[in-house]
């Protein structure tokens, strides 16, 4: 399987500041790439709900509430949540985990920086 | 003839009178005069005044208030004002319709949430509970009571639950639902839910047809009683169910058993799917939910009356199965009210024998934590 994986260059780090994200198309596949505090992450830009353009949505934090917060709302995961622009389904960018449905987790692609270039393999 | 065929023939012979029937919604009739005896001053004086008024069916100022008496009457029709005055009368009448254990709800106090005076509502709650235990539940073992909770003062209601937590005749808590404001999901009611969970007593929401500014939907728009009655109970219950799920009551009180009465059951799949649909878009409004809303709806219990009567009874079986209802649906007659259901209407539904026994009685035993003789197993 490994033989079929190919490396692709996404951009130079100088052109991809912290706290931004973009959707790139590689081999006909739309992929969301995120720079979160200098670390790069990539997810398929395809929402499993109704196949919406997930990674063109806003990146922000989200609200949590549980016994630990005494059932009060707390803002959390700042900059780590992408929300599908179609219906608002939220995903944790670092893990691909869907917040609403624990059984849904997106695949994540390997992304790294080499010689000032952001590279992805899939 | 195969063993299987013999079995199925033998099983078919089981009849309604052979199985345990628990009726999770029957109504006693509380008169203002009787309440007065058990009521603290100064509100006893009010009830003494109310007792002198000509009684109108669930339409008495200061006792069962609302915008009522708006329909032009005609002679004839069926008996819409049946009441049960004594526990002996109730036991006899329930025996006639093959009911073994009945869970008591009030008549007038169905409209209790419409009473604006907090201290009066509390006094009435205490009077009703004391009277019901003294005159009904402690006299007939097969009649079990639900304490009424005055939403007007949640802390007083919680104290009432603590007071009667171990009372053998009390098996649950009745939450008046018509005209309640705010809806039962509001966190001001948490002390009630905490006390109920601590006492291991379930809560049952019960509405009533009425017109009231607080009622969650526009029942004053209808030109017929049929229109009003078609959606009154159902919309009220749906509004409160949605309120409770979206504020996380079943998450904050995971051991609290919650039931919805007198709204039928066919709408449950609808509201479950509506909630799940909204959840996709609005999860962060309800981040305390660890699962999709239908997960919690499937843990609620539902009373059958007024049971839907589709041309094809299998349709109703399917609707009940859609919410896992073979485990959580409980027969209710609403005796002696005008729209009561005879147990045979539910008994005849084409369920498996096992599911039928559950719905007719066993689910209620589990919900109320009572045995088949009506004794509490949690005290």
Image: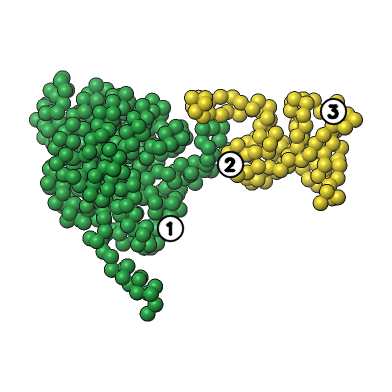
The residue that disc 2 covers is A101
Q: Are marks 2 and 3 on the same chain?
A: yes
Chain A: colour as depicted: yellow
The residue that disc 1 covers is B318
* Residue B50 appearing in the image: no
Q: Are marks 2 and 3 in contact (CB under 8 Å)?
A: no
When asked about the image quadrant of residue B185, the answer is top left
Q: Are marks 1 and 2 in contact (CB under 8 Å)?
A: no
At x 65%, y 25%, the residue is A78
Q: Where does the image place residue B14, in percent across and percent down from the top left? A: 28, 65
Relative vertical location of residue B347 with respect to residue B155 in this rendering, above or below: below
At x 41%, y 48%, the residue is B267
Question: Please, which residue is most extreme toward the bottom here?
Answer: B1
Quadrant of the image for the N terminus of chain B? bottom left
Mark sitting earlier along the chain (2/3): 3
Q: Are marks 3 and 1 on the same chain?
A: no
When asked about the image quadrant of residue B162, the answer is top left
Mark 1 nearby-residue class (10 Å; few <14, some 14–19, many ≥20): some
Mark 2 nearby-residue class (10 Å; few <14, some 14–19, many ≥20): some
Which chain did the renderer colour green? B
Q: Find numbered disc 1 in the image and state the secondary structure of the residue it sits on.
A: helix
Residue placed most toward the observer, B299 or B236: B299
Front label number (1 vs 2): 2
Q: Residue A13 — which label?
A: 3
């Amino acid at each position: 399987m490994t033989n079929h994986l190919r490396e692709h260059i996404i951009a130079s780090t100088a052109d991809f500041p912290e706290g931004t994200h973009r959707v790139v198309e590689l081999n006909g596949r739309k992929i969301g790439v995120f720079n979160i505090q200098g670390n790069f992450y990539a997810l398929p830009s395809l929402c499993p709900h109704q196949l919406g353009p997930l990674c063109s949505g806003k990146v922000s934090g989200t609200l949590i509430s549980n016994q630990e917060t005494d059932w009060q709302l707390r803002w959390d995961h700042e900059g780590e949540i992408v929300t599908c622009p179609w219906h608002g389904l939220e995903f944790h960018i670092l893990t691909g985990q869907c917040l609403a449905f624990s059984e849904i987790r997106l695949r994540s692609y390997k992304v790294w920086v080499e010689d000032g270039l952001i590279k992805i393999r899939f | 003839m195969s063993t299987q065929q013999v079995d199925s023939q033998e099983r078919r012979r089981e009849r309604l009178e052979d199985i345990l029937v628990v009726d999770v919604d029957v109504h006693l009739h509380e008169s203002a005069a009787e309440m007065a005896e058990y009521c603290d001053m100064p509100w006893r004086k009010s009830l003494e005044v109310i007792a002198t008024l000509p009684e109108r069916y669930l339409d008495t100022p200061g006792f069962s208030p609302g915008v009522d008496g708006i329909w032009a009457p005609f002679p004839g029709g069926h008996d819409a004002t049946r009441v049960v005055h004594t526990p002996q009368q109730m036991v006899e009448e329930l025996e006639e319709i093959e009911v073994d254990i009945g869970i008591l709800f009030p008549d007038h106090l169905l409209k209790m949430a419409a009473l604006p005076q907090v201290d009066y509502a509390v006094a009435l709650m205490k009077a009703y509970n004391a009277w019901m235990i003294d005159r009904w539940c402690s006299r007939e073992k097969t009649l079990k009571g639900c304490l009424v909770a005055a939403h007007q003062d949640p802390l007083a209601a919680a104290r009432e639950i603590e007071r009667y937590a171990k009372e053998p005749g009390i098996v649950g808590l009745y939450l008046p639902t018509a005209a309640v404001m705010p809806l039962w999901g509001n966190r001001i009611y948490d002390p009630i839910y905490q006390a109920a969970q601590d006492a291991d007593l379930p809560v049952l929401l019960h509405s009533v047809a009425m017109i009231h500014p607080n009622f969650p939907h526009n029942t004053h728009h209808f030109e017929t009683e049929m229109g009003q009655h078609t959606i009154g109970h159902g919309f009220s219950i749906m509004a409160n169910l949605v309120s409770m799920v979206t504020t996380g009551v079943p998450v904050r009180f995971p051991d609290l058993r919650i039931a919805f009465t007198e709204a039928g059951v066919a709408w449950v799949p609808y509201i479950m799917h509506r909630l799940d649909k909204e959840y996709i878009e609005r999860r962060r409004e309800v981040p305390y939910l660890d699962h999709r809303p239908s997960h919690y709806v499937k843990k609620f219990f539902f009373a059958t009356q007024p049971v839907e009567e589709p041309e094809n009874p299998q349709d109703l079986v399917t609707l009940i199965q859609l919410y896992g209802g073979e485990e959580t649906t409980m027969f209710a007659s609403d005796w002696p009210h005008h729209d009561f259901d005879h147990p045979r209407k539910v008994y005849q539904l084409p369920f498996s024998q096992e599911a039928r026994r559950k719905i007719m009685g066993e689910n209620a035993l589990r919900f109320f934590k009572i045995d088949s003789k009506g004794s509490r197993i949690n005290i």
